[in-house]
Image (spheres, rainbow, N blue to C red):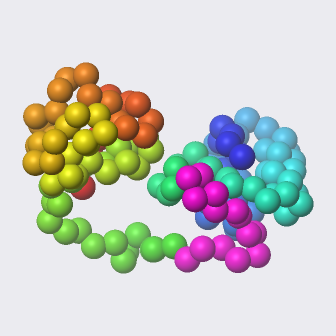
Amino acid sequence: MMHGDVTYTDEALYENKLSVVFEDQAAARDTLDKVREFIRNNPTVYCSTHTPLGYENLESKKVVDLDNPPQTIPPGEIAVKEATGKYICSICGQVYDPAVGDPEHGIPAGTAFEDLPADWKCPRCKQSKEKFNKA
């Protein structure tokens, strides 16, 4: 199931919380209740608007179980580390690793991200390289 802004995160879906933005609270509540009812009655892969693992959930066909939410990492426990040299697509989460390259698209191992052709696209979602961030 894909949607607009019924929920911004999977945590909101599991906790039955409305998004922070809505024009009509009663309609928003009704919509979220219907989404949760659908999920309870149908095996559903759900992609929230700002879910970092949405694409991975879709690829692995991870079905939502509202009674057993996945464990999340509290923001205070996320550690800042050294850059990895890899780049991550901000749209789908695809990782570009210079050590691996993109051999399926003619990019040999050892090709620095900065040296990718200007017209290179994310192999997964086909977005431009400007959508990638340093990891």
Q: Which quadrant is the C terminus positioned in?
A: bottom left
Q: Is residue 116 above or below residue 17?
A: above
Between 120 and 21, the one nearer to me in the picture: 120
- In the displayed orientation, state which residue is furthest to the top: 119
Q: Is residue 3 magenta?
A: no
Residue 134 percent location from the top left of the image: 22, 49
Number of numbered labels in the structure image: 0
Q: Residue at x 69, y 55 (%)?
A: 45
Asked if residue 49 lies left or right of residue 117, the reply is right
Q: Observer-nearest residue: 82 or 88? A: 88
Task: Tell me which secondary structure the magenta stretch mostly adopts.
Answer: loop
- Looking at the picture, how far across and down is residue 125, in whole percent? 44, 36
123, 36: nearer the viewer: 123
Residue 54: horizontal and vertical position, in percent? 54, 52
Is residue 57 in view from this perspective?
Answer: no
Quarter of image, res 112: top left
Question: Residue 72: where, in percent of width, then height?
Answer: 51, 73
Q: Nearer the viewer, residue 65 or 126?
A: 126
Judge left or right: residue 39 versus residue 15: right
Residue pictured at 25% horizontal, 22% vertical: 119
For image coordinates 26% across by 48% down, the residue present is 96
On the image, which quarter does residue 123 sit in?
top left
Q: Is residue 67 magenta?
A: yes
Magenta residues, start to end: 58-71
Can residue 18 be seen here? The reply is: yes
